[in-house]
Image (cartoon, rainbow, N blue to C red):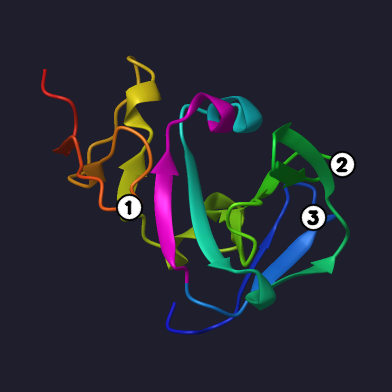
Amino acid sequence: MAGATVEGHCLCGDIVFECDANPKWTVHCHCETCRRANSAPVTTWSCVPLQSFRFKQGTPRYFNSSPGVRRGFCGNCGSPLVYQNERWPGEIHYCAVALADSSQVTPGRHVFVAEQLPWFETADDLPRFAATSVGGTQPVRHGAKPK
């Protein structure tokens, strides 16, 4: 991305966002909450500084999915868009696939693979972390589960 402004939107186009910072990280999350919030076996998030992110058009609705966590989505089409957690007040996570060009981000790891669905696997060699990847935790493996 090299500092370029990226833009994204919901399915119906009512909500448009932009960000002018490179992601701090992009991860594939397998936790149950993300799966349910996005109705998908995995959610890919990009983390950016909150001050670099803005909604250009429309205002999302929010749902508090757990204490200190809110998830923003389009109130018209239901597209999930953002995740915010009180533990990280200076950042926002946006759904990488909501970008107008999702190829502009590159995931670097999988998190919460202890909660991964047994019938879903991806064919990449990225590190997999049982839960979060912060605080010096080590991956449980690299690449897909052995057969």
Q: Which residue is identified by label 1?
A: 135
Residue appearing at x 47%, y 30% in the figure: 31
Mark 1 and mark 2 in contact? Answer it, CB < 8 Å: no
Earlier in the chain: of badge 1 and badge 2, it is: 2
Which marked residue is nearer to the observer: mark 1 or mark 2? 1
Which marked residue is nearer to the observer: mark 1 or mark 3? 1
Counting other residues with Cα less than 10 Å from the Cα at mark 2, is it few (<14), some (14-19), or many (20 or more)?
some
Quarter of the image for the N terminus: give it. bottom left
Q: Is residue 115 magenta?
A: no
Which marked residue is nearer to the observer: mark 3 or mark 2? 2
C-alpha span from label 1 to label 3:
38 Å
Counting other residues with Cα less than 10 Å from the Cα at mark 3, is it few (<14), some (14-19), or many (20 or more)?
some
Quarter of the image for the C terminus: give it. top left
Counting other residues with Cα less than 10 Å from the Cα at mark 1, is it few (<14), some (14-19), or many (20 or more)?
few
Q: Magenta part of the protein: which range?
A: 23-34
Vertical arrangement, residue 1 with respect to residue 25, above or below? below
Earlier in the chain: of badge 1 and badge 3, it is: 3
Mark 1 and mark 3 in contact? Answer it, CB < 8 Å: no
Vertical arrangement, residue 106 with respect to residue 85, above or below? below
* Secondary structure of the residue carrying numbered label 1: loop
Query: What number is the disc on residue 75?
Result: 2
Farthest residue, direction left: 146
Residue 74 percent coordinates (x, y)? 81, 45
C-alpha span from label 3 to label 2:
11 Å
C-alpha span from label 1 to label 2:
35 Å
Query: What number is the disc on residue 13?
Result: 3
- The kind of residue on which mark 2 rests is Gly
Residue appearing at x 54%, y 51% in the figure: 97
Q: Nearer the viewer, residue 93 or 135?
A: 135
